[in-house]
Image: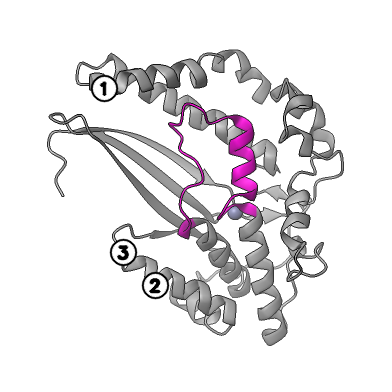
């Protein structure tokens, strides 16, 4: 479907992934050989949950918006959002391109768990719209952790799968899965969700970034207990990495919106929405920037 003489604004954001425990580096030897994608899927097919998620992937790939796959040093899911406008109609067209990057180094078991974790992110609809004028830092952090396809759901699925594979093949459970007692209990999701909010020594940072934390329902969730989960991509507890990601995302979105507003090609019908976005999302950005460091 042609989009005519439209122009687009691109914004990229990535879901944090690859959880480490207390930043402890694994002493396990990583094989030199790159494990092929087909080996990983064959391994996953030997478990019920693995077949379930691969089945979901197969159904998804029959649709228009296919997930792309790539290899890299760290597993993560990237989303590229493109907004384009028809010059004649002024109609906004959005496209979201999802790339799942799977790490190259590690054991078959580790890589298979990574793939399952990232698929939970990649297969779900986006939890927020980066151009939503009302998207707050709190909403962004909470949805990224607890929303559909968020970190808690991905970790719960990964750990259930790890348990199933360990029962069949005797692989040890990853450390990040060791704190939950019963992964199939009703409380498993909320207990896991709480783990993500343990930030310990980062509490002062949080109160700087959330100046109204006592009145904010999300900021109230933070726990002054030693973190058990760290984002490998951000090298900090999840809420900290996600808050930084929000700042980066907002900076890009503000830049794009300013650029578009200054362009003569900007459809007048969208200007009100864009100005609202600038007012609510971009005005105090510079002021808060240092707090995120
Ligand atoms: Zn993740």
Q: Residue at x 62, y 68 (%)?
A: 110
Question: Compared with residue 205, is residue 193 higher up or lower down, i.e. above or below?
Answer: below
Whether residue 145 is in magenta: the answer is yes
| Dot 2 or dot 1, earlier in sequence | 2
Q: Which residue is mark 2?
A: 58
Q: Which residue is mark 1?
A: 269
Whether residue 215 is in magenta: the answer is no
Real-space CA distance between mark 3 and mark 1, rounded to the nearest whole angstrom:
32 Å
Please name which of the two marks, 2 or 1, marks the residue nearer to the observer.
Answer: 1
Mark 3: few/some/many CA within 10 Å (<14, 14-19, 20+)? few
**Quadrant hosting residue 57:** bottom left
Q: Secondary structure at mark 1?
A: helix
Real-space CA distance between mark 2 and mark 1, rounded to the nearest whole angstrom:
40 Å
Mark 1: few/some/many CA within 10 Å (<14, 14-19, 20+)? few
Question: Compared with residue 273, is residue 240 higher up or lower down, i.e. above or below?
Answer: below
Q: What is the span of residues highlighted in magenta in the rendered image?
A: 122-151
- The numbered mark at residue 63 is 3
Please identify the quadrant where the C terminus is shown: top right
Real-space CA distance between mark 3 and mark 2, rounded to the nearest whole angstrom:
9 Å
| Dot 3 or dot 2, earlier in sequence | 2
| Dot 3 or dot 1, earlier in sequence | 3
Q: Is ligand 1 closer than 8 angstroms to the Cβ of mark 2?
A: no
Q: Residue at x 64, y 47 (%)?
A: 145
Q: Nearer the viewer, residue 281 or 168?
A: 281
Q: Nearer the viewer, residue 70 or 56?
A: 56
Q: Position of residue 89 (x, y in %)?
A: 16, 31
Q: Is ligand 1 closer than 8 angstroms to the Cβ of mark 3?
A: no
Tell me if 112 is positioned left or right of 156 in this view: left
Contact (Cβ within 8 Å) of mark 3 with mark 2: no
Q: Residue at x 79, y 33 (%)?
A: 202
Please name which of the two marks, 3 or 1, marks the residue nearer to the observer.
Answer: 1
């Amino acid at each position: 479907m042609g989009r005519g003489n439209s122009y687009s604004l691109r914004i990229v954001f990535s879901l944090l992934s690859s959880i480490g425990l207390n930043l402890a580096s694994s002493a396990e030897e990583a094989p030199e050989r790159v494990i092929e994608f087909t080996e990983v899927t064959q391994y996953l097919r030997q478990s019920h949950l693995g077949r379930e998620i691969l089945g979901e992937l197969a159904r998804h790939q029959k649709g228009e918006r296919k997930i792309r796959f790539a290899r890299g040093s760290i597993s993560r899911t990237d989303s590229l959002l493109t907004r384009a406008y028809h010059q004649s109609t002024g109609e906004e067209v959005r496209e979201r391109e999802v790339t799942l990057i799977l790490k190259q180094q590690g054991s078959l078991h580790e890589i298979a768990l990574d793939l399952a974790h990232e698929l939970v992110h990649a297969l779900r609809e986006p939890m927020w719209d980066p151009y939503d004028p009302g998207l707050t830092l709190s909403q962004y952090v909470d949805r990224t952790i607890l929303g559909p396809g968020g970190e808690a759901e991905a970790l719960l699925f990964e750990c259930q799968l790890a348990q199933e594979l360990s029962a069949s093949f005797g692989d040890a459970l990853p450390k990040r899965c060791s704190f939950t007692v019963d992964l199939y209990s009703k409380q498993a999701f909320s207990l896991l969700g709480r783990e993500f909010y343990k930030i310990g020594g980062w509490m002062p940072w949080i109160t700087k970034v959330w100046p109204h934390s006592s009145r904010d329902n999300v900021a109230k969730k933070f726990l002054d207990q030693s973190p058990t989960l760290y984002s490998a991509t951000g090298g900090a507890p999840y809420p900290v990495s996600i808050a930084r990601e929000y700042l980066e995302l907002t900076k890009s979105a503000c830049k794009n919106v300013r650029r578009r507003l200054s362009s003569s090609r900007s459809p007048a019908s969208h200007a009100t929405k864009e100005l609202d976005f600038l007012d609510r999302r971009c005005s105090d950005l510079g002021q808060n920037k240092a707090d995120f460091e």
